[in-house]
Image: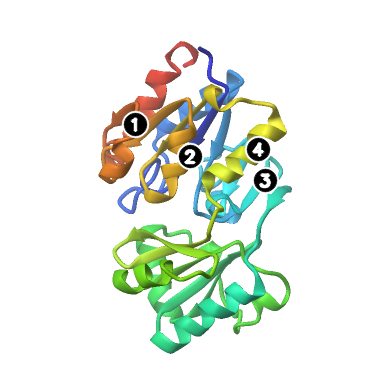
Amino acid sequence: MKYKVLFTDIDGTLMCPERKFLTKQCKDMLTGLQENGILVIPTTGRGFKAIRPEILGGIRADYSICNNGACVLNREGKILYSHPMTKEQMELLCKLASEHDYSLGFSFSDGYYSYYNDSIFREFYRVNNGDMECMIEGCDHKRHLTDMPFSGWGMVPISHAQEFNRQDNGLVMIPFKDISHDICQLGINKKTGADFLLEYLGIDWKDTVAVGDGFNDLEILRAAGIRIVMDNAPDALKACADIITDDVKEDGATAAIKKVFLSLT
């Protein structure tokens, strides 16, 4: 079968804190797929600015599913679909961070804004990502007066995140690393963003390949025609894998994607 789409996570799949860039082999492989008509579509918790071509080694994604499915964009960065947080959700998170002294920030259309304990999150982001251009200073807790964010992040103790997830507030905290959590809208995930895009493009799920490593990849992996899971992924993801590939530090995603698309690379 000639698959038509590659859905690929970024952090923990193509990049990691020890290697904050794509390997040459990965760039060559993704470029080769695009040259052969395969759509390369990042599916990531990152905002759109954080996957600009210079971050991806010069590669321009055909489409992008960002903010864990809350925003879908075309090649030029035009928003095709979006599902921002509500004012009430934003206020709830700010109240929580203020009361418990959490580090909290939000992903808006133009970048990341840190609302509480800025220095803590900036250091975490510097170590794990390093692309400080995305971190916009000087929001003064007013950025949401222009429009709402698509997602958020929080440095929240695991027990508090679990308690938060039991509440009926339309939000969910998804563990990323240690006490860092993506904060997403309940029912909005990478698969729902991909559902919209596949319908828009007229492509069936059976014609897709997905690769990922984290809990926020679970829904899209379960739906894909071929499911590639990193060795550094939790067992819940490995249980649904067609292929378990090497750790991200060993560029395992490149090897597995090449294997699936062997006739095209």
In whole angstroms, how far apart are the C-alphas of marks 4 and 1?
23 Å
- Residue wearing tag 2: 220
> Which percent across, then down, holds residue 224?
48, 30
Closer to the chain start, of discs 4 and 3, is 3
In contact (CB < 8 Å): disc 2 and disc 4: no
Q: Secondary structure at mark 3?
A: strand
Closer to the chain start, of discs 2 and 4, is 4
Name the front one of labels 1 and 3: 1
- The reply, left or right, for residue 96 in relation to residue 149 is left
Closer to the chain start, of discs 2 and 3, is 3
Inspect the image, locate mark 4, and give the three-letter code of the amino acid beneath it: Leu
In whole angstroms, how far apart are the C-alphas of marks 2 and 3?
17 Å
- Assess disc 3: are there few (<14), some (14-19) or many (≥20) residues with their C-alpha within 10 Å of its C-alpha: many
- The reply, left or right, for residue 47 in relation to residue 200 is left
- Residue wearing tag 1: 241
Inspect the image, locate mark 3, and give the three-letter code of the amino acid beneath it: Leu
Which dot marks residue 72? none
The quadrant in which residue 143 appears is bottom right
- Assess disc 2: are there few (<14), some (14-19) or many (≥20) residues with their C-alpha within 10 Å of its C-alpha: many
Inspect the image, locate mark 2, and give the three-letter code of the amino acid beneath it: Ile
- Assess disc 1: are there few (<14), some (14-19) or many (≥20) residues with their C-alpha within 10 Å of its C-alpha: many
Name the front one of labels 2 and 3: 2
- Determine if residue 7 is in view: yes
Inspect the image, locate mark 1, and give the three-letter code of the amino acid beneath it: Ala
- Residue wearing tag 4: 197
Vertical position of residue 185 compared to residue 238: above or below: below
> Which percent across, then down, holds residue 103?
42, 77
So how many labels did they put on this image? 4
Closer to the chain start, of discs 4 and 1, is 4
Which dot marks residue 73? 3
